[in-house]
Amino acid sequence: MTQTHMLTRHRDIQNWVTDRNGIPAIARVRNRFGEERAQLKLSFKRHDHDTVSKTSLDDGMSPVSWTAWLAELDRQKLALQISTAADDFEFVERRDEHRVS
């Protein structure tokens, strides 16, 4: 059975990503009105050093510092929902009862 956990603490998110050889990135995307916004991304490398992510590097991803990435995560009020059965994740709306630190 697959269980999911929501990570909101900065340290927990950073540890989960770096334990899987991931790096934070941000892509600039435009909505249908032409307004630009930041879209959080994570890029992972497999043992054979091929880049693996939910998007390719051609999608406008720019690696950023953890400080900038986590600040954007907080600004958008998002959390990282992870699956315990696989190294799968998604960004979800943060619930009010979760603390960030």
Image: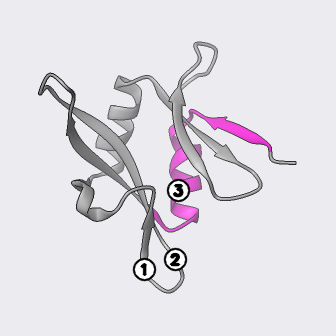
Q: Residue furthest front?
A: 32
Nearer to the camera, 85 or 79: 85
- Determine if residue 101 is in view: no
Q: Which mark is residue 50?
A: 1
Q: Which amino acid type is shown beneath numbered disc 3?
A: Val
Residue in the image at 47% along x and 28% along y: 78
Contact? badges 2 and 1 (CB < 8 Å):
yes
Q: Secondary structure at mark 3?
A: helix
Mark 1 is surrounded, within 10 Å at the Cα level, by few (under 14), some (14 to 19) or many (20 or more) other residues, namely: few
Distance of label 2 from label 1 (alpha carbons): 6 Å
36, above or below 48, in the image: above
Please name which of the two marks, 2 or 3, marks the residue nearer to the observer.
2
Read off the magenta span: 3-22
Residue 14: horizontal and vertical position, in percent?
Answer: 50, 50
* Left or right of residue 86, residue 42 in this image: left
* Left or right of residue 87, residue 14 in this image: left
